[in-house]
């Protein structure tokens, strides 16, 4: 009888643990499907969240970084060859697609693409 009870408790524990693990995994994959559409949403989101932003490049910081702004705030966007495109992208309406990167202090975006808006 003791062996049967022990086996039953073991099976129950495994089932419960599997259910919690599946729920945690599902929650982790759902968060990657969400995207931030404004600077304010991006700042409130976690690292690796996708972004689709529409706004302006206010300033080119260096060869790989620009200051992006929309009507909800500003943030730093890392993109390739920013300095080379300085005259074209500064104060132009752009769409930024990428993901949130950063550390404990700042929210930044690594751009996969930056395109001019019409």
Image (cartoon, rainbow, N blue to C red):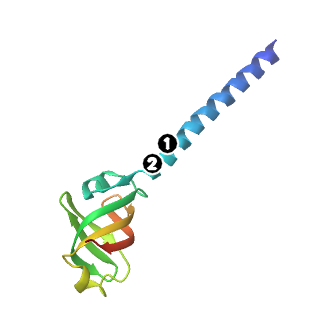
The vertical placement of 12 against 24, above or below, is above
Residue that mark 1 sits on: 27
Q: CA distance from mark 1 to mark 2?
A: 7 Å
The vertical placement of 110 against 49, above or below, is below
Choose top left, top right, bottom left or bottom right for residue 101. Answer: bottom left
Mark 1 near mark 2, Cβ–Cβ under 8 Å?
Answer: yes
The vertical placement of 28 against 4, above or below, is below
Element under disc 1: helix
Task: Decide if residue 35 is on the left or right side of residue 26.
Answer: left
Element under disc 2: helix
Task: Decide if residue 61 is on the left or right side of residue 30.
Answer: left
Residue that mark 2 sits on: 31
Residue 95, given in percent of the width and then of the height, sits at 30, 68
**Residue at 35 percent of width and 58 percent of height:** 104
Residue 105, given in percent of the width and then of the height, sits at 30, 59
Choose top left, top right, bottom left or bottom right for residue 57. Answer: bottom left
**Residue at 26 percent of width and 58 percent of height:** 39
Residue density around tag 2, few if under 14, some if 14–19, many if 20 or more, within 10 Å: some
The vertical placement of 50 against 7, above or below, is below
Q: Nearer the viewer, residue 8 or 51?
A: 51
Choose top left, top right, bottom left or bottom right for residue 66. Answer: bottom left
Residue density around tag 1, few if under 14, some if 14–19, many if 20 or more, within 10 Å: few
**Residue at 53 percent of width and 40 percent of height:** 24
Task: Decide if residue 81 is on the left or right side of residue 31.
Answer: left
Question: In the picture, which quadrant includes the C terminus?
Answer: bottom left
């Amino acid at each position: 009888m003791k062996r049967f009870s022990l086996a039953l408790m073991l099976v129950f524990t495994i089932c419960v643990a599997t259910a919690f693990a599946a729920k945690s995994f599902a929650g982790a994959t759902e968060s990657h499907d969400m995207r931030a559409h404004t600077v304010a949403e991006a700042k409130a989101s976690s690292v690796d969240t996708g972004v689709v932003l529409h706004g302006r490049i206010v300033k080119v910081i260096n060869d790989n970084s620009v200051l992006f702004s929309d009507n909800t705030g500003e943030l730093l966007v890392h993109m390739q060859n920013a300095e080379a495109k300085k005259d074209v992208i500064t104060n132009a309406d752009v769409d930024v697609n990428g993901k949130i990167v950063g550390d404990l202090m700042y929210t930044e975006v690594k751009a996969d693409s930056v395109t001019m808006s019409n």
